[in-house]
Image (cartoon, rainbow, N blue to C red):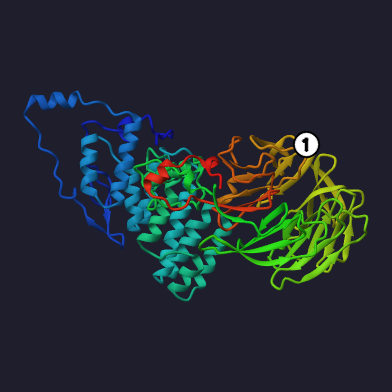
């Protein structure tokens, strides 16, 4: 990369030197013609010649001279690329190749002063390395950084003396060299404590230090390099860093990337751009669950991803087991007796309990033991109540519930009333990770935060139309709202701003539940009154997939929190659909598939 630090105007020193000789040698010994030494594992020089490569003989042919003079001068970008390639080849130990590259291009990897400094650090010649700092000072962006660099050098010198058992010499470094710098006195106090270490292993453990040798000195050099302009010394492994950044950027821009990001380069090909196929995305029907005998109003995967709960107008909750290997679902239990039907479900943080709520005219709430299938609590404060929504406190010992008739309660697992808030007509609830703040959407088209401990409340979100439902991201930063006649809106709860309005979904005055999902919650899915499931990338307003197959309104979607390729949807058609990647197909069949919206069943 092009440097902009001091000394850049010295073309003869910092950039390509066409036709110049690149064989400077350091005071520590001769180096390769590329300016870098080969080192063994203990940091000693093992080859101090030009890697056996002699300079090409001078030609008496005048045409050779003419060709040299006509040689194109490299641009700054071309110089940078050559230096990056040279550094990478050097790290691979291909020093003869580096020498030839530098000779032919007229470039060098780094400034001669930086080469000397590098060699002295790697050889542990600390006094010479300190002298090199004076030469480097004029080339640095911030000359004051010399103090920090000197501190790092002396710290390594001090630790190596201690490891060698030279306690008096180490003490001298601490008192006469480190302390007078008047820099990072807290660290100096910590360093002084290492004098009490009884042996080298104890020192390395307490200092979290690799010990004297190539490893710790290379790590030191990486830290020292951060204070030097790249025109003087390239950042370590710069080419790999740039390639990783390119791969990560391509993955971030990929609309269908739904797997864990591997920061290494070994798992990818650098010869092709990254691109995920739509066929790898959960937009193909894998299973249709038909055990409910009426409209299915809600579905929710457990926090550990091994179960799915579905609630229906048919008065039952069905618990399904998720096989994490085959990603197939099997009926576990049916929980019966919800006279008004089940319109909302909430898993406890540890998945031990499940709470079921009913529609507007339901004054009861059911708390089930998932393992035994037994009803632990059936709560009803008053027959005039409407308990339509619930949210668990992160401690798993309390929950809040409420409805549109003005009830807002905090209760324990036995249904005992702990606190109540009067006059709040609740549409939907959520408890933030702090365990104190409860979010509630109300009939005033807003979401407010309520603190039951100090009885304070504040406005967080204000919409212009009724908020039918909302959900919050795992980190508590983003809220996803289904807004009547408007669709799906994304809000930043911290900044209290509307981030994005997602297009495509048909949202009237039915309660439809959307959700975050996929790896890193990069995706958003919502049901719709036009019988479809819509999926968006969080950063894109237009849907990336429209899933067809349901024949009536899709009331709820739930993305498996552990298996990013598994999605469930519940519909008024009485079915629950499980969506996943395309089934295994041969190349011809895969190429013949249309987009997700073509998968009808």
Q: What residue sits 28% from the left and 39% below the top?
A: 108
Secondary element at image label 1 = loop
Residues 25 and 579: in front is 579
Quadrant where the N terminus sits is: top left
Q: Nearer the viewer, residue 337 or 12?
A: 337
* Residue 295 higher or lower than 399, as above or below: above
Residue 304 picture location, percent across and down = 62, 63
- Residue lying at the far front in this picture: please name it: 293
Image point (79%, 35%), residue name: 465
What residue sits right under mark 1 in the picture? 463
Identify the residue at horizontal 11%, vertical 27% (top origin): 64
Q: Position of residue 391 (x, y in %)?
A: 77, 56
333 left or right of 406 in image: left
Confirm whether residue 87 shows in the render.
Answer: yes
* Classed neighbour count for the residue bearing mark 1: other residues with Cα under 10 Å, few (<14), some (14–19), many (≥20): some
Rendered view: 43 above or below 586: below
Which residue, as the protein is rendered here, is positioned at the far left?
60
Query: As displayed, is residue 351 above or below residue 98?
Result: below
**Residue 536: quarter of image:** top right
Residue 189 position, x and y percent, is: 57, 62
Quarter location, residue 420: bottom right
Total count of labels: 1
- Foreground residue among 248 and 277: 277
Residue 174 percent across, percent down from the top left: 49, 61
Q: Is residue 33 visible?
A: no
């Amino acid at each position: 990369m092009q440097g902009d630090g001091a000394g850049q105007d010295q073309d003869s020193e910092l950039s390509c030197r066409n036709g110049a000789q690149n064989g400077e040698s350091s005071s520590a010994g001769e180096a390769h013609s590329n300016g870098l030494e080969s080192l063994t594992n203990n940091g000693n020089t093992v080859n101090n010649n030009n890697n056996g490569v002699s300079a090409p003989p001078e030609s008496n042919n005048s045409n050779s001279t003419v060709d040299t003079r006509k040689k194109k001068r490299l641009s700054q970008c071309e110089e940078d690329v050559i230096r990056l390639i040279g550094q990478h080849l050097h790290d691979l130990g291909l020093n003869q190749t580096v020498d030839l590259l530098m000779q032919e291009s007229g470039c060098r990897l780094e400034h001669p002063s930086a080469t000397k400094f590098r060699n002295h650090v790697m050889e542990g010649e600390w006094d010479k390395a300190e002298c090199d700092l004076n030469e480097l000072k004029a080339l640095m962006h911030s000359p004051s950084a010399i103090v920090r660099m000197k501190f790092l050098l002396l710290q390594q010198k001090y630790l190596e003396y201690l490891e060698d058992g030279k306690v008096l010499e180490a003490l001298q470094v601490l008192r006469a060299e480190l302390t007078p710098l008047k820099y990072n006195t807290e660290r100096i106090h910590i360093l002084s404590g290492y004098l009490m270490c009884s042996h080298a292993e104890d020192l390395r453990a307490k200092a979290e230090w690799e010990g004297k040798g190539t490893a710790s000195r290379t790590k030191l050099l990486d830290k020292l390099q951060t204070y030097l302009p790249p025109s003087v010394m390239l950042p370590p492994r710069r080419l790999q860093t740039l390639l990783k950044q390119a791969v990560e950027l391509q993955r971030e821009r990929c609309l269908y990337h739904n797997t864990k990001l591997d920061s290494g380069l070994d798992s990818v090909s650098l010869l092709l751009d990254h691109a995920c196929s739509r066929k790898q995305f959960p937009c193909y029907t894998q299973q249709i669950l038909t055990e409910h005998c009426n409209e299915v109003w809600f579905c929710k995967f457990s926090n550990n991803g091994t179960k799915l709960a579905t609630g229906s107008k048919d008065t039952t909750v069905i618990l399904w087991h998720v096989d994490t290997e085959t990603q197939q679902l099997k009926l576990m239990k049916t929980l019966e007796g919800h006279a008004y039907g089940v319109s909302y479900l909430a898993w406890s943080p540890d998945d031990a309990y499940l709470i079921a709520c009913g529609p507007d005219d339901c004054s009861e709430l059911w708390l089930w033991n998932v393992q035994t299938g037994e009803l632990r609590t059936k709560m009803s404060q008053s027959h005039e109540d409407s308990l339509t929504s619930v949210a668990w406190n992160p401690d798993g010992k309390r929950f809040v519930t409420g409805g549109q008739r003005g009830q807002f309660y905090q209760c324990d697992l036995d249904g005992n009333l702990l606190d109540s808030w009067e006059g709040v007509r609740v549409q939907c609830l959520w408890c933030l990770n702090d365990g104190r703040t409860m979010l509630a959407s109300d009939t005033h088209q807003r979401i407010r935060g309520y603190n039951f401990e100090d009885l304070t409340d504040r406005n967080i979100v204000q919409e212009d139309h009724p908020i039918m439902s909302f959900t919050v991201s795992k980190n508590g930063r983003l809220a996803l709202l289904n807004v009547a006649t408007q669709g799906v809106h994304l809000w930043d709860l911290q900044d209290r701003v509307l981030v994005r309005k997602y297009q495509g979904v048909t949202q009237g005055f039915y309660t439809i539940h959307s959700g975050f999902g996929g790896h890193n919650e990069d995706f958003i899915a919502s049901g719709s009154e036009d019988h479809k499931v819509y999926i968006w990338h969080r950063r894109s307003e237009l849907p990336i997939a429209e899933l067809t197959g349901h024949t009536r309104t899709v009331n709820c979607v739930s993305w498996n929190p552990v298996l990013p390729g598994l999605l469930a949807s519940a519909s008024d058609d009485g079915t629950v659909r499980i969506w996943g990647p395309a089934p295994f197909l041969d190349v011809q069949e895969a190429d013949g598939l249309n987009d997700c919206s073509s998968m009808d069943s």
